Image (spheres, helix red, strand yellow):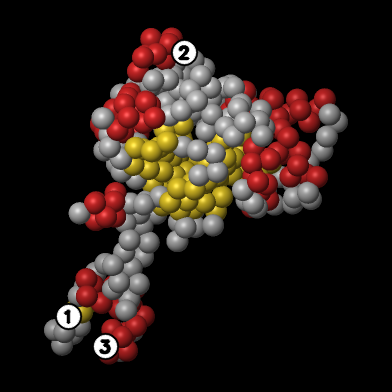
Amino acid sequence: MRFEVHILGCGAALPLPGRNPTAQVVNVHEKQFLFDCGEGTQIALRKERIRMMRIDHICISHLHGDHYLGLPGLVSTFNLLGRTRPLHIYGPDRLKEVLDLHQEVGEGRLDFPLHFHPTSPEEPQVLFEDGSVQLESFPVKHRIPTTGFLLREKEREPGVKRDWVRRHDLVPSEILALKRKEDVVRADGTRIPFAEACHPVPAARSYAFAADTRYWEVLTEFIRGVDLLYHEATFGEEMKARAEKTFHSTARQAARIADRAGVGRLVLGHVSARYDRFDSLLEEARAVFPETMMAEDGMMLEVVSCEEIGERGA
């Protein structure tokens, strides 16, 4: 089942050619979540050939322009394209004022249901869940109320092997017991072990997004053990004082968070426009956390479980 992160923009406040402000689409089991929506997100969606009308959930971390200014236009485009399916938007409570004012001054009317869900910058929340995925928000430390987001894949049911069904003439109640990871013991003492009768269940995967935050060790509690972490790295360590003043992080600080949280892999983004090359940022991060990469616009990342990462490295 697909669990992919498509980076549409990984730049900081100043857009650059080839480096859009923050936006990314996460596809989990063919459900598409848009994390942040900076300027140029619509163009990036078209450039990457992402079917934007299949985005049903949009998560906005905070109300700095480089993280949400593309949203009113995207909502308008959905309307122009004849959207009828509901759209869920999660973000700071005042984001609703922005969207409502946009519709009011333009005398607009949406022809599809828009459901707004306020997020809390004070405590973790479960924002959405269904049978296969759970969306959460968690606090981060930035200059204004800001949250990160976390997508967790739910553990899948084990599949019973067909040859075991035929060979042992399994009845529905026995199949259900095996799917619950229970051994089946028949009246005659015959035991059908779950571990042998069922296919191995892949480990559930997880992805965390922390686009704007200063170094804050409490963050590790919310993202403990996630398989892939996107964390801002606006500055290098030589500008640590600037990072602290502006409530941002250095590449080394992001790596320290990843290391202390025990995540599988780290991807760095939200890099200041002052950096033309990322070599020094990547080097300082990898010195702390080797499983680090730099985000690039257009990059596609597969979310791989920590368990599988360990097997690949063995």
Mark 2 / mark 3, whichever is N-terminal:
3
Residue at image mark 2 = 246
How packed mark 3 is, by other alpha carbons closer than 10 Å (few <14, some 14-19, many 20 or more), is: few
Image quarter in which the C terminus is found: bottom left
Residue at image mark 1 = 191
Relative to 115, 147 lies left or right: left
Q: Amino acid at mark 2?
A: Thr
Q: Residue 9: x, y in percent?
A: 56, 35
Q: Describe the element under mark 2 as helix, strand or loop.
A: loop
Asked whether disc 3 touches disc 1, contact meaning CB atoms under 8 Å apart, the reply is no
Q: Describe the element under mark 1 as helix, strand or loop.
A: strand
Mark 2 / mark 1, whichever is N-terminal:
1
Give the foreground label among 2 and 1.
2
Image quarter in which the N terminus is found: bottom left
- Position of residue 312 relative to residue 295, above or below, is below
For the residues labelled 3 and 1, the Cα–Cα distance comes to: 11 Å
Mark 3 / mark 1, whichever is N-terminal:
3
Quick one: 232 or 177, which is closer to the camera? 232
Asked whether disc 2 touches disc 3, contact meaning CB atoms under 8 Å apart, the reply is no
